[in-house]
Amino acid sequence: MSRARIVCRLSLLTTLLAAGPLAAAETPVLHVMMESTSPPFASLNGKGQPEGFAVDLIRAVAADQGLRVELDLRHWQDIYADFQQGRGDILGLVVPSEERAARMDFSLPYEKLVCGLYFHRERPPITTLADLRGLRLAAIKNSITHEFARRQPWDADIRTYNSLAECLQAVERGECDALLGTHLITDYQIKHLGFTHVVRSALEFTEINYQLCFAVQPGQKALLARINQGLFTLKLNRQQDALHERWLGPLEPQQLRWRDLGPYLPAITLVATAVLAVLLWQRSLLGRLSRQAKAIRENEQRLQLVFEGSQDGFWDCDVGADRVLRSPRWASMLGYAPDEISQGRKGFLDLLHPDDLAAFTADEKIVWAGRDHFAREHRLKAKSGEWQWILDRGKVVARDPATGAPRRITGTQTDITARKLAEAQAGKLQHKMQETQKLESLGLVAGGIAHDFNNLLTVIVGNTSLARLETGESAANRARLDSVLTSANRAAELCHQLLAYAGKGSFRTERIHLNELVTETTRLLELSIGKQPKLEFALAPGLPRNEADPSQIRQVIMNLVINASEALEGRPGTIRLATSAVTIGSAAPSGTPPAMEVSPGDYVCLAITDTGCGMPPEVLARIFDPFFTTKFTGRGLGLAAVLGIVRTHHGTLKVESTPGRGSVFRIFLPVAQSGTVHPFASLSEPEAPPA
């Protein structure tokens, strides 16, 4: 048996012996007085009825002892003064002290409280007794804390109020700096009243014997004994603990004894058996769940390895929430971190190439119409600013049963930029090969025809010249022969152009200075192009020399300048000739004909610019085709011959033209190497006419 219980029983026995036999007469109504502002121990509810732990406790004691009680709840000062005048039988919520022991007798304590200090949060914290000096201290008048504060050497300004609520209000409003109060009651009232500026200090006053008791008038030993007997009985049958849990909470755990478990052993055994069965079932279930979780983790790891091996990105779209979950690989494929891309649909559209938006929207409508699987190719903008080709494959995994609209779509993303570049390069090579084959075929045909036709023309020109010498003075015959000779010479020029296009003309290479050749040739053209075009020169000084046939290069210059003059269509304009030294890398200049091959190295560039009518793209694509011309009287071999001459000299050319703004022809000729003369393509001379 605990020491507290032994002391309690001895106190009860002493009280009973001192009281003597109890009166058998009917007990009169006892006037019980309590403070009305000490919840949760005693207070008046909204209907004005007493309630609280001490209220229910005295009622339980009265019921156990057969007492009749009436409750009177008012301010502490009122009931304390009335009780001292002998107007009440029992005083509740009273704390024993030496000063009060002379005026009343106390029951066994039924609750022990800890007293502490509370202060206004906006003032400096109070951590020591020295901090109390000179403070305005609030206390309930004639309370145990008031008596305690008056005996202390704090030099504090003690201000008394009728209730704890008034003390708290004084501190809340700043009328007082602090107050003394029990933690349980004070914390309850701070929360109940909604005060926010009153906080608890770390100071506690353990020297205050704050044990709550019931008090009776001096000499009422019999009544005191019955109160103590009732408290003891309520403690034994746990009724007081139940009231404590209802109003104050289980502050101190009760010791459990085996005899207390006796009535509950069958139920406890049944519950234990059921719990054991549940635990065994739970263990089996947990084992099964653990195996399933392990299998899921293995599948996830396997799927992750598949994605890592394939280098594909994964995405999962919640259509209703407009949220797209993308794997780190999806973002890193474009050079982004996952958090740099918006999770909504807009985040994807911001990266989509504008030219691919229409196709994406059309494909999206088909998916909304009912197609579950899809695969599309589009371009997305990488963080570097480049466009990457993406193969996007997906599947609708959930649809709205009512509307059929997709709810969830998942898929993968594959970078196909390398494949697209390879396809584009293959297409260019195929086109270039076709153009090369076409040019070679045309060159073979043109070269063969021109070669044979040139031999026939040689015979015609020779015999016509001899016949012209033998006609004598006949003017009519000489005129006819002159006409035949002129036509034959023009046909011979046409053959030379065909041979130049086929790369089989007669060439004599030497080291030339392009600036000098341009100057000489344009002097000859000044009379041919008329007065409207204005020739301008921008010849770079110090150009390296080239290995070329001067007559062929002169023909190139003349053809291009005459074409530029005709592009002016008789209107005033400018033809500009400019030279420069350039270096060509591994890639040919943009705008060169597909069949032109060029080696990296140093070149001399001749640029001929006009301000004429220009050419539309469909004309620009065919200007080097033999016999293609836009002129009414043209033969369509001028630019074809230029192409053949430049290609034979291992050079290249580039054309730029805009309708209404003119054209630019750039001829690139390789710089002459030191030492021996650079060998050109094999040249073939026309056969001599038969004798």
Image (cartoon, rainbow, N blue to C red):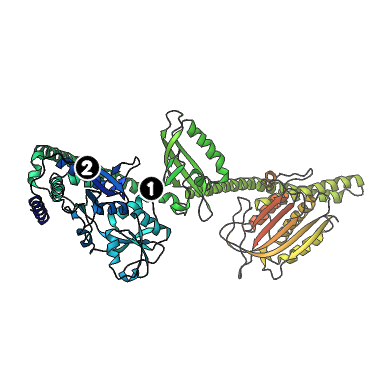
- Residue 532 is situated, as x and y percent measured from the top left of the image, at 85, 55
On the question of residue 298 being in view, the answer is no
Helix, strand or loop under label 2: strand
On the question of residue 391 being in view, the answer is yes
Q: Which residue is mark 2?
A: 69
Residue at x 65%, y 53% (from the top left corner) = 503
Foreground: 18 or 336?
Answer: 18
Q: Is residue 575 left or right of residue 542?
A: right
Mark 1 residue type: Ser
Q: Which of the labelled discs sits on residue 310, or is there none? A: 1
Residue at x 10%, y 40% (from the top left corner) = 24
Helix, strand or loop under label 1: helix
Mark 1 crowdedness (10 Å alpha carbons): few <14, some 14-19, many ≥20: few
Image height of 627 relative to 210, above or below:
above
Residue at x 50%, y 54% (from the top left corner) = 383
Q: Is residue 455 left or right of residue 331?
A: right
**Separation (CA) of disc 2 from disc 1:** 88 Å
Q: Is residue 87 left or right of residue 545?
A: left
- Residue 385 is situated, as x and y percent measured from the top left of the image, at 54, 54
